[in-house]
Amino acid sequence: MNPIARLFAALASIIGFYGCDGAHLAQLKPGISTAQEVRERLGLPGAEWPNADGSVTWEYTRQPEGFECWMLTLNQAGVLQKIEQALTQDNFAKVEKGWSEMQVRRLLGKPRSEVKFPLKPEVVWEWRIEPSQRGNNAFFHVHFSLDGVVTGTSRREELPG
């Protein structure tokens, strides 16, 4: 990659490119793209999750205002293996009572907010998600006991305004 392209990639990762994820992700090819290429297009990951097979999954969340959290898995050689959107109905359905905060974070990525309700008592993590009706605001919530164990989930959708 030439120096001007490297500079542009670095600036994009610093400034942010929330509206350009599709273009950047489309340039990444599983089985071909390298860890260096991923970093040049997307910047440093928000989290790195080691996998049992020696691969690693990099988290790129677009919270608090975006609807996506991209999980990119690279093999031991640093070659991209897959790109997955974490904030899906299938993943929401996987969250179970008794899970730990770390299990939820690993599946869904960093939440947009965490709120503690001491009188309830519970902690609620919230992700902004795709609404069922265009123009609405939608959120997925995971409810935890104060000791960090999932007690349930919920979803909220609001009209704009």
Image (cartoon, helix red, strand yellow):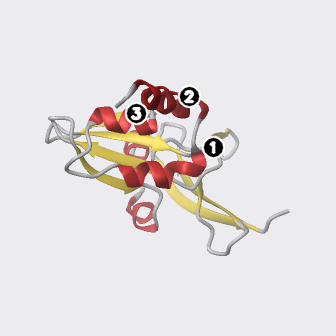
Q: Secondary structure at mark 2?
A: helix
Q: Residue at x 58, y 62 (%)?
A: 154
Residue annotated with mark 3: 40
In what quadrant of the picture does the N terminus appear? top left
Q: Residue at x 43, y 39 (%)?
A: 41
Taking 23 as reference, is 107 left or right?
left
Is 2 drawn above or below residue 30 in the view shown?
above
Which comes sooner in the sequence, label 2 or label 3?
2
Residue annotated with mark 2: 14
Crowdedness near tag 1: few (<14), some (14–19) or many (≥20) residues, C-alpha within 10 Å: few
Residue annotated with mark 1: 121
Which label sits in the foreground, 1 or 2? Answer: 2
The amino acid at mark 3 is Glu
- Nearest to the observer: residue 78 or residue 40: 40
x then y, percent, for residue 7: 48, 26
Between the C-alphas of marks 1 and 2, the distance is 39 Å
- Nearest to the observer: residue 145 or residue 132: 132
Crowdedness near tag 2: few (<14), some (14–19) or many (≥20) residues, C-alpha within 10 Å: few
Which comes sooner in the sequence, label 1 or label 2?
2
Q: Secondary structure at mark 3?
A: helix
Q: Secondary structure at mark 1?
A: loop
